[in-house]
Image (cartoon, rainbow, N blue to C red):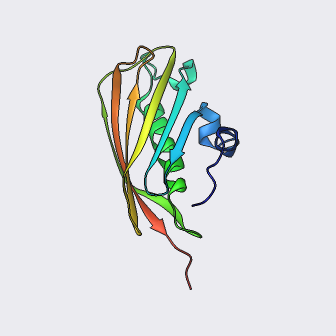
Amino acid sequence: MPELPTLEELNSRGQGFLPGLIGVKFIHVETDGKSGLIRSELTVRPELRAPNGFLHAASVIALADTSCGYGTRLLLPEGANFTTIELKSNHLGTAREGTITCEARSVHAGRTTQVWDAEVRSPEGKLMALFRCTQAVLYPKG
């Protein structure tokens, strides 16, 4: 089993890319090589809100998708990469301020696909969004 990345490594990986731009912060990572769990958080800032003052749905999706994507990397076979092929998000609430949290778990980690579920919670701990994505596992050609 490959060595588990540190939280510092996970957090630095997003610098200069969307996760760093919006402020995704990883706070927990674990895997047994067959399944994975990632916890992350995002502090609500004015630029992450929609014009109506509520957190933009795309900000919630970015947190969940980033968390699932970083989790996917934990379970990839040697030399493989991945891309998202489907995602779905159900939004049950929102936030205007504070820090929202995400917990992403692997549901299926196969040779050609991975499926991840995530729950996003409000600063008060209330369920805000349910998220599921499917990742295609990509292998080098030749």
Q: Quadrant of the C terminus?
A: bottom right
Residue 46, relative to residue 103: is it above or below?
Answer: above
**Residue sitting at x 44%, y 27%:** 56
Where does residue 14 sit, x and y in percent of width and height? 65, 43
Q: Quadrant of the N terminus?
A: bottom right
Where does residue 39 sit, x and y in percent of width and height? 50, 35
**Residue sitting at x 54%, y 48%:** 70
Q: In terms of image quadrants, where is residue 136? A: bottom left
Front in this rendered view, residue 29 or 114: 29
Where does residue 88 sit, x and y in percent of width and height? 32, 44
Where does residue 65 sit, x and y in percent of width and height? 46, 43
Residue 51, relative to residue 4: is it above or below?
Answer: above
* Numbered marks: total: 0
**Residue sitting at x 50%, y 13%:** 97
**Residue sitting at x 64%, y 37%:** 20
**Left or right placement of residue 44 versus residue 10 in this view:** left
Residue 70, relative to residue 119: is it above or below?
Answer: below
**Left or right placement of residue 134 versus residue 138 in this view:** left
Front in this rendered view, residue 139 or 38: 38
Residue ranking furthest to the bottom:
142
Front in this rendered view, residue 30 or 136: 30
Q: In terms of image quadrants, where is residue 21? A: top right
